[in-house]
Image: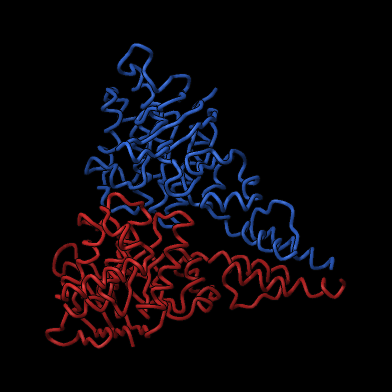
Chain colours: A blue, B red
């Protein structure tokens, strides 16, 4: 089943007339249920605009966005989209700064906030809070206050808060950008588990290329246009494209690129340092 | 000597239930011309230490000297100190407040009570140094410029006081790879042209490997390591003990040594390791040719 479908989507922020910025131009792609997709691009490439279009916070100027077959735009003749809340409860959004998403002073209240607003019965809220905290590995903090947690822990609480609404799609909008490397790993491992065990579709927006290894497909935006749609392996073999999109190769791929530039040819995709070291040693023996 | 501490300690909320020792007997020397990176996990005391350097936190225990300022005296001249040590906080663009970029940048020089001509000169100088056109960008509102430009404008506001020491807390946080490169080459050029001593907090070990001449690692408020990046990253005991990550160059060099390559321990960036490899693999190839 197609979870997120963009068809010829364009979007413009027209704050004043002389200064029309085309944020997205003619974007089309399908993301299927259960996929883990990474969306990359430099600052200002349109990544956040795309995430806001996905849960109807923004509506496309032209083209259409569908979430499990439901359009984000109102039906013809209607002023408002009657099914916008179906979309919002299907697509959970996690932002960059977890502090901006905390609403309560005790963690279990914070997690309960979402389902309370959806009118979920009390017993079930209780169950969902327990499940959500367990899923992100934070059950022991249930009665704590969020203020004393690390960045990674806060972000996991923010994820639990969204999980409690039982979304089918989770969008992380640069949710790892403010975290240190440990926090980033913590959050991404949690998300990966949600994808594998709960079957939640993931759209992870980032400009950190190290994060891309968690997903199985990458979309790259460049100045509002879709510049690439494929696997991380394919992308990393195309160093020039990566550079023109204001991104950079992960360090190992960069080493391979530099070696190739200097006449030491390595044609295959290299996963990690170990593999590169082995390959190079074989090469040295042959010479 | 740019910064010198001896047994510097600091405790928050003394006598309350929230009492917490943030720095314990910190002794360190940062020389003029150093590019010093300060590493350590959340809560290791990095920010507390940084805030001592320009007197945002006043020394309470131990000794502290910054440039010519003896902060052990009874009434140190904090005001002049703050005009000599420029502080760039995390996400400095959130601190832009005035209605034009130029006015914002002039805030520091104005507080130094400089005359109008000098203030104008400093604003132009600072904006030019960070790569923003004073005539074009200077007249804009900070809200009209891009994220990368905002961060540059905020840094211009700090360097307009012409600090001798530039202190930066994670200057590349939240930037894309291109923006990161731009800010780091800006810091490097500011070090050459304006502020000979740079102190930088970062979590990015690749930046440490590329830029630092000296590294200080804090752990639970104490100095766990003080030396060069190459010394640090080749010292497995310290690296494990402080659970530091390795720069990607060092991680690669370690694997290469494991399989039998002879890689110089001073090669700590990917570029340096690749240069090493080329020497190891290539000469024979040339002989054959």
For the residue pair B193 and A158, the one nearer the viewer reads as: B193
Q: Determine which quarter of the picture holds residue A76.
A: top left
B161 or B214, which is in the foreground? B161
Picture quadrant where residue A254 is located: bottom right
Say which of B95 and B113 sits in front: B113
Front position in the image: B104 or B121: B121
Give the percent coordinates (x, y) of residue A51.
42, 36
Residue at horizontal 59%, vertical 38%? A229
Above or below: residue A94 compared with residue B26? above
Relative to A108, is A191 on the left or the right? right
The image position of residue B46, as x and y in percent, is 33, 69
Is residue B196 visible to us here?
yes
- Label count reads 0
Where, quadrant-wise, is the C terminus of chain B in this rendering? bottom right
Q: In x, y percent, where is residue A122?
A: 26, 25
The residue drawn where x is 48% and y is 80% is B228
Q: Is residue B203 left or right of residue B78?
A: right
Residue B185 picture quarter: bottom left
Q: Is residue A202 found left or right of A213 in the rendered image?
A: left
> At x 50% / y 40%, what residue is drawn?
A193
Could you tell me which quadrant the N terminus of chain B lies in?
bottom left
């Amino acid at each position: 089943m197609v979870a997120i479908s963009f068809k010829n989507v364009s979007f413009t922020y027209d704050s004043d007339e002389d200064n029309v910025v085309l944020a997205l131009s003619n974007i089309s792609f399908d993301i299927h249920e259960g996929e883990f997709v990474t969306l990359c691009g430099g600052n200002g490439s349109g990544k956040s605009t795309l995430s806001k279009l996905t849960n109807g916070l923004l509506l496309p100027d032209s083209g259409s966005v569908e979430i499990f077959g439901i359009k984000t735009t109102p039906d013809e003749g209607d002023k408002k989209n009657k099914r916008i809340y179906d979309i919002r409860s299907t697509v959970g959004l996690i932002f960059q700064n977890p502090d901006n998403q905390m609403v309560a002073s005790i963690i279990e209240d914070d997690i309960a906030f979402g389902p309370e607003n959806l009118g979920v019965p009390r017993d079930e809220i209780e169950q969902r809070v327990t499940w959500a905290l367990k899923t992100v590995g934070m059950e022991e903090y249930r009665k704590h206050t969020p203020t004393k947690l690390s960045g990674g822990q806060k972000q996991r609480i923010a994820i639990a808060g969204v999980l409690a609404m039982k979304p089918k799609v989770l969008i992380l909008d640069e949710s790892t950008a403010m975290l240190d490397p440990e926090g980033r790993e913590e959050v991404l491992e949690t998300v990966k588990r949600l994808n594998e065990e709960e079957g939640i579709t993931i759209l992870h927006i980032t400009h950190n290329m190290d994060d891309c290894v968690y997903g199985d497909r990458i979309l790259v935006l460049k100045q509002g246009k879709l510049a690439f749609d494929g696997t991380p392996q394919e992308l990393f073999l195309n160093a020039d494209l990566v550079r023109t999109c204001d991104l950079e190769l992960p360090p190992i791929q960069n080493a391979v690129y530099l070696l190739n530039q200097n006449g030491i040819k390595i044609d295959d995709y290299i996963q990690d340092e170990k593999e590169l070291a082995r390959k190079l040693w074989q090469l040295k023996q042959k010479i | 000597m740019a910064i010198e501490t001896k047994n510097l300690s600091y405790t928050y909320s003394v006598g309350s239930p929230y009492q917490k020792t943030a720095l314990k007997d910190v002794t360190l020397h940062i020389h003029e011309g150093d590019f010093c990176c300060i590493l350590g996990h959340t809560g290791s005391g990095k920010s507390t230490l940084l805030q001592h350097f320009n007197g945002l936190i006043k020394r309470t225990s131990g000794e502290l000297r910054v440039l010519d300022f003896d902060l052990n005296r009874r009434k140190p001249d904090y005001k002049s100190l703050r005009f000599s040590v420029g502080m760039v906080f995390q996400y400095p663009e959130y601190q832009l407040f005035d209605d034009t970029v130029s006015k914002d940048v002039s805030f520091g020089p104005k507080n130094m009570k400089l005359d109008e001509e000098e203030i104008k000169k400093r604003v132009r100088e600072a904006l030019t140094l960070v790569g923003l056109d004073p005539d074009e960008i200077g007249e804009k509102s900070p809200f009209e410029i891009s994220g990368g430009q905002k961060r540059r404008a905020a840094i211009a506001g700090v360097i307009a006081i012409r600090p001798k020491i530039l202190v930066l807390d994670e200057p590349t946080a939240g930037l894309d790879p291109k923006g990161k490169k731009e800010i780091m080459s800006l810091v490097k050029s500011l070090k050459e042209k304006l502020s000979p001593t740079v102190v930088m907090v970062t979590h990015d070990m690749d930046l440490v490997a590329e830029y630092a001449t000296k590294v200080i690692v804090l752990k639970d408020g104490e100095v766990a390591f003080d030396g060069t990046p190459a010394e640090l990253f080749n010292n497995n005991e310290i690296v494990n003990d402080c659970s530091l990550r390795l720069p990607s160059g060092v991680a690669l060099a370690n694997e290469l040594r494991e399989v039998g390559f002879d890689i110089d321990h001073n090669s700590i960036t990917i570029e340096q390791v690749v240069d090493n490899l080329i020497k190891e693999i290539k000469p024979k190839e040339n002989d054959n040719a």
